[in-house]
Amino acid sequence: MLDESMEILKKRIQQIVGLLEKLKEENENLKSLMIKMEDENHSLKEEINSLREEREQIKNKIDSATSMLDSLAIEEEQEDNKQC
């Protein structure tokens, strides 16, 4: 009877140890995944910042071009008014 109880206890301990090893491995895998995702997140934030800067530059160029076109239109109107 004591031998049976000891054998059952031994099997349970082995199961617990096996489960603990699996959990440790899963924890390491999750840590690695988290590091990769943090790196990707950092890269994406940098890309977003770069795209925002590029968007601002394009907006400024469009504003400048629009201002030039407006100036040309005003000059044309003034010349047309002078001719009339």
Image (spheres, rainbow, N blue to C red):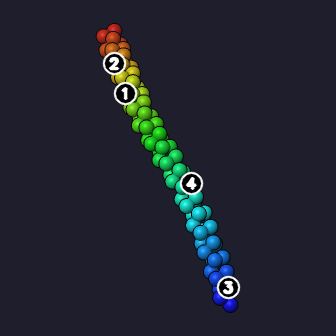
Q: Is residue 46 shown left or right of residue 6?
A: left
Quarter of the image for residue 52 reads top left
Q: Which one is in front, 6 or 69? A: 6
* Left or right: 4 in relation to 57: right
At a point 48% along the width and 43% down the height, the residue shown is 39
Q: Are marks 4 and 1 in contact (CB under 8 Å)?
A: no
Write the residue at 62% across / 67% down: 18
Q: Which residue is mark 2?
A: 71
Number of numbered labels in the structure image: 4
Circle 4 residue: 29
Q: Position of residue 71 (x, y in %)?
A: 33, 18
* Mark identifier at residue 60: 1
- Which part of the image, by quadrant, shows the N terminus? bottom right
Of the two numbered discs 4 and 2 in the rendering, the one whose residue sits closer to the viewer: 4
Secondary structure category for the residue under label 3 = helix
Q: Nearer the viewer, residue 75 or 65?
A: 65
For disc 3, the marked residue is 3
Residue placed at 50% from the left, 43% from the top?
A: 40
- Identified by mark 3, the residue type is Asp
Q: Mark 3 Cα within 10 Å, few/some/many (few <14, many 20+)?
A: few
Q: Secondary structure at mark 2?
A: helix
Asked whether 20 or 74 is in front, the reply is 20
The answer to whether residue 81 is above or below residue 45 is above
The kind of residue tagged 2 is: Ser
